[in-house]
Image (cartoon, coloured by chain):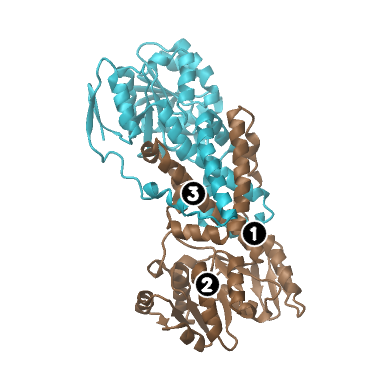
Chain colours: A cyan, B brown
Amino acid sequence: MRRVAVVGLGLVGGSVARLLHEQGVEVTGYDATAATRAAARAAGLRVADDVADVCAGEPDVLVLAVPLRAMRTVATEVARHVRGGTVVTDVGSVKGAVRDAVTSAGLGARYVGAHPMAGTEHSGFEASDAAMLDGARWAVTVDGTTTREAFLRVLGLVTGPLGGTVHVLTDDVHDEATALISHVPHVLATELLGVVADAPVRDVALGLAAGSFRDATRVGRTDPRRTEAMVTDNAAWVASALRVVVRDLEQLVRALETNAPVGEFFDRPEPVRAPAPAPGTGERRRVELDDAGAWRSALAAAGARGAVVVGVEDGAVEVA
Amino acid sequence: MRRVAVVGLGLVGGSVARLLHEQGVEVTGYDATAATRAAARAAGLRVADDVADVCAGEPDVLVLAVPLRAMRTVATEVARHVRGGTVVTDVGSVKGAVRDAVTSAGLGARYVGAHPMAGTEHSGFEASDAAMLDGARWAVTVDGTTTREAFLRVLGLVTGPLGGTVHVLTDDVHDEATALISHVPHVLATELLGVVADAPVRDVALGLAAGSFRDATRVGRTDPRRTEAMVTDNAAWVASALRVVVRDLEQLVRALETNAPVGEFFDRPEPVRAPAPAPGTGERRRVELDDAGAWRSALAAAGARGAVVVGVEDGAVEVA
């Protein structure tokens, strides 16, 4: 991995660029905002002045790190200028919608999705930090068209200089899982704050609030526009998970109102109450990167069972 | 404050007894379980062998620190033996139900409610720790029958050797507020874990889970029986808050499914998004503890607006 381009230098793109730079990779950044380009240059990064310039360097990997609402426009611009063997990836929190945008722009054959499970409640290049990605778990997403070369290039970037642990997944499995562990938690944190905001006992509630409320609402205090974008970008999976939440809470309310037993509600999480085992500690399995492409579904199936990449060779990937 | 008795030496009762002992108060503990009595004695506490013995010492305050399901039985036993001017208080997380139990037992005239907003996900005397109560915010609850003497005794105990900050509240305001900031957050954390436990993508979801899921589910990992008891003890207020949550989430789901705007949902917490001001920094007000008893509603009204006790004299209490 010699040359990487990062288009969009916000919290995640900025952190990726800084970490790669620290790791000795030749990074070129770009951001549509001149002030961000200046800040990135002041931080010691090499920054191009337009997308054409970024693509002209024929980077090994070009990372799209722009918000989803800008993805279609930026991907189209990249498609006009990209050349040679440059592979395209991204860092967005929703994978199906990004693939749609990238494919519409004509970049499908170069594309492999990626998403680091890391972030803070802040935004922008000023908040970016190489350390934010320390030991992060990443999803790398494939579909039936992913090429072996592009896949290995992105895998090499994430497990190499970015130091991540990789779950290989389909877009759908990624989007369903992140709805459950990130987007729905953001919705519930927002709702808890909202209920308190409207309550007649608001002031005393905030005065008495201790650890359980602080933790439960932490991500509800982030930029509401960013949370809204994340939730609407993954609307289908979020809505389907929230339907289950609404059904369960309605049953609980009815039981509480009628003095019916509620023990089952509290026992249901038992299978996941203990901390999850460390990733990579399960049974090891080697998947050959065969020409027929069966490796894509084999790796995604292992990923869906929680396996992560523990070894990468030219012709095979080992998961556990 | 010379002598205090603590009946029930679990997480909270044990922590109260340890802290009072550290502060040089003469504490006598009691627990129905012989092993707990032995553990408390081994920790250097003075422990009585029955409730009669505890009451015979005529403590200034007797703290009921037993679970709500045992409250009626224990309060009846205390009522049989209590004598002199002993004031009775408790540390339960629901105040209306405790007052009912204590009043039925005939202890109403001696009773003032109390609740420290502190805890951990562990239980039992082994988990008790004086430091758990460091700087805790306490609710002290009054009704139309609370005597000035009993109130000042409990206020003195909590703001004195226990080092707490006191919100004076009615039982209802306490129970509505704690439903919002503690019981409903416990329900939502439990539900989040439950949805993941049942999801086809469970393993990968747990594998990818990062900070937002860890914080959102922390209290969902506590002893489910304790959470269940807390929620059912405050069933009416929890159910009414959950009705609002169900209504709001249902609206959000419908909007997400139909591509309707959802910005309002994310903007609604704005009034409480910033951290709450430190308690005790508002306008100071002195409330005379008049014979007619108007002080009870005056203090509870100030408490409902978020005020805390900042000064205690013989004949007046200052709040801010």
> Looking at the rendering, in which quadrant would you find the N terminus of chain A?
top left
Residue A6 drawn at (x, y percent):
43, 24
The residues bearing labels 3 and 1 have C-alpha atoms spaced at a distance of: 22 Å
- Residue type, mark 2 in image: Met
Q: Residue at x 31, y 40 (%)?
A: A279
Which quarter of the figure has residue A174? top left
Discs 2, 1: same chain: no
Q: Position of residue B255 (x, y in %)?
A: 62, 32
Residue appearing at x 33%, y 27% in the figure: A300
Q: Nearer the viewer, residue B182 or A19?
A: B182
Q: The disc numbered 2 marks a residue on which chain?
A: B
Which SS class for mark 3?
Answer: helix
Which chain letter matches label 3? B
Report the residue marked by disc 2.
B71
How many marks overall?
3
* Cα distance in 3D space between marks 2 and 1: 26 Å
Amino acid type for the residue under numbered disc 1: Val
Q: Nearer the viewer, mark 2 or mark 1?
A: 2
Mark 1 neighbour density, 10 Å: few (under 14) some (14–19) many (20 or more): many
Q: Is residue A257 above or below residue A314?
A: below
Camera-nearest residue between A220 and B72: B72
Q: Residue at x 45, y 59 (%)?
A: B225
Image side of residue A163 versus residue B241, left or right: left
**Residue underneath mark 1:** A204
Question: What residue did someone put label 3 on?
Answer: B189
Horizontal side of residue A155 vs A82, given as left or right = left
Amino acid identity at mark 3: Ala
Q: CA distance from mark 2 to mark 3?
A: 27 Å
Nearest the eye: A12 or A142: A142
